[in-house]
């Protein structure tokens, strides 16, 4: 029965997708679409259904057992009211002209108001049925948006990503039933019995031994001017032993910055691109004085399959949503793993509705992270 309560589908047009997923009394919908689509037209087709929804542009989308890496297709997932008990969709203005303090304050206020509307205690440490899914405008930092949510309440689990697109970083607006454009949209959800949420994250890297890069000068939190007291591009290339002429999206995807806090975790800060001089632009915020290690990507297959198998072992999964970094897509392609990893999801979750998108950054429980898959599974029991 559950497979009819959650439906995922991909097609060349939003009309085809809606025809497939708007059955069985949907209580929530989520959409991802390629850069060749007009987000306003997609939004206009969804709104007449009067179903709460969020969606955004991406760099590639997962549905069933394949990745759609073109710029035209759309994927969607609907979750029925049999599973969704209560939901609030709201947006925060993330326009680049706004101050971080203003974004943080609006995010905190709207998150608190949403929780009150559906009677969620944001300080309750036991919330297996409550979650917020975030989609953020991709060319502005998601950090103050997430910080506002954390200030409202640390106990509610949150997950999501920043709207992706192509590596030319065109504007990647977000859509929702509560507004669209340069926004951060969130869906705060409470599930009916006997359904629950599980989430986790996984990244696939190994460190270059004894190669460190210290942030010695910033233009702003996402614009590094100097590393180790040298122009950022020079220091990065020296650490890799490559000439400046070889800096490409593939190099950035396969060689990234990170922090090892000593507990087995890796906090990744990925490089978006170089500026028009000798600086580097990052996907998330950087603090002056940060001592980064240099990591290189490895096969994603083993770590992803192990993580999903461990977390979801002996659980009845009824739906799976993946937030997967655009750089993971690029790295997968360079390692010739695109089809293999898409097939892995179908092998581990056979017949389970799945959907995912390639993000500009991922977020989980208030942290804005990079080059990671964060995922949300709905389970029964």
Image (cartoon, rainbow, N blue to C red):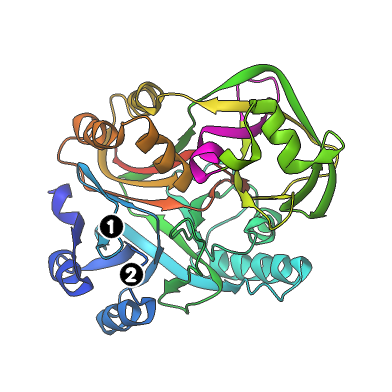
Question: Which residue corresponds to mark 2?
Answer: 36
User: Over which residues does the magenta segment extend?
Assistant: 248-266
Q: Quadrant of the C terminus?
A: top left
Q: Residue at x 42, y 57 (%)?
A: 190
Q: Is residue 11 left or right of residue 301?
A: left
Where is residue 325 drawn, in percent x and y? 47, 45
Question: Which residue corresponds to mark 1?
Answer: 70
Label 1 and label 2: CA atoms lie apart by 9 Å
Dot 1: element: loop
Q: Residue at x 65, y 34 (%)?
A: 257
Q: Residue at x 43, y 60 (%)?
A: 165
Pointers 1 and 2 in contact (CB under 8 A)?
A: yes
Q: Nearer the viewer, residue 378 or 354?
A: 354
Where is residue 170 drawn, in percent x and y? 50, 67
Q: Nearer the viewer, residue 22 or 346?
A: 346
| Earlier sequence position, callout 1 versus callout 2 | 2
Q: Is residue 80 left or right of residue 60?
A: left
Where is residue 1 drawn, in percent x and y? 12, 49
């Amino acid at each position: 029965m559950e497979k009819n309560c959650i439906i995922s589908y991909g097609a060349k047009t939003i009309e085809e997708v809606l025809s497939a997923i708007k059955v069985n009394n949907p209580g929530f919908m989520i959409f991802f679409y390629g850069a060749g689509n007009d987000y306003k037209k997609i939004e206009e087709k969804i709104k007449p259904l009067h179903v709460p929804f969020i969606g955004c542009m991406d760099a590639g989308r997962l549905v069933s057992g394949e990745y759609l890496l073109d710029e035209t297709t759309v994927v969607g997932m609907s979750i029925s009211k049999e599973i969704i008990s209560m939901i609030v969709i709201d947006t925060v203005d993330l326009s680049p002209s706004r101050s971080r303090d203003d974004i943080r304050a609006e995010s905190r206020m709207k998150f608190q108001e949403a929780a009150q509307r559906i009677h969620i205690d944001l300080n309750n440490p036991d919330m297996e049925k409550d979650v917020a899914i975030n989609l953020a405008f991709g060319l502005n930092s998601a950090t103050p948006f997430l910080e506002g949510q954390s200030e409202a309440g640390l106990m509610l689990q949150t997950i999501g990503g920043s709207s992706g697109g192509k590596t030319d970083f065109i504007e990647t607006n977000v859509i929702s039933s509560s507004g669209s454009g340069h926004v951060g949209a969130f869906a705060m959800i409470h599930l009916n019995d006997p359904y629950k949420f599980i989430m986790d994250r996984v990244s696939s890297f190994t460190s270059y031994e004894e190669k460190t890069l210290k942030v010695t000068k910033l233009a702003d939190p996402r614009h590094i001017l100097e590393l180790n007291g040298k122009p950022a591009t020079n220091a990065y290339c020296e650490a890799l032993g490559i000439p400046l002429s070889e800096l490409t999206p593939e190099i950035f995807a396969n060689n990234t910055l990170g922090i090892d806090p000593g507990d087995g975790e890796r906090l990744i800060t990925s490089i978006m691109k170089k500026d028009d001089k000798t600086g580097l632009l990052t996907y998330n915020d950087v603090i002056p004085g940060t001592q980064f290690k240099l990591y290189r990507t490895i096969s994603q297959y083993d770590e992803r399959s192990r993580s999903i198998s461990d977390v979801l072992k002996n659980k009845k999964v009824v739906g799976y949503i993946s937030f997967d970094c655009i750089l993971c897509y690029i790295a997968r392609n360079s390692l010739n793993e695109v089809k293999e990893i898409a097939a892995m999801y179908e092998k581990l979750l056979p017949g389970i509705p799945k959907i995912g998108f390639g993000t500009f950054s991922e977020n989980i429980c208030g942290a804005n992270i990079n080059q990671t898959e964060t995922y949300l599974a709905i389970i029964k029991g």
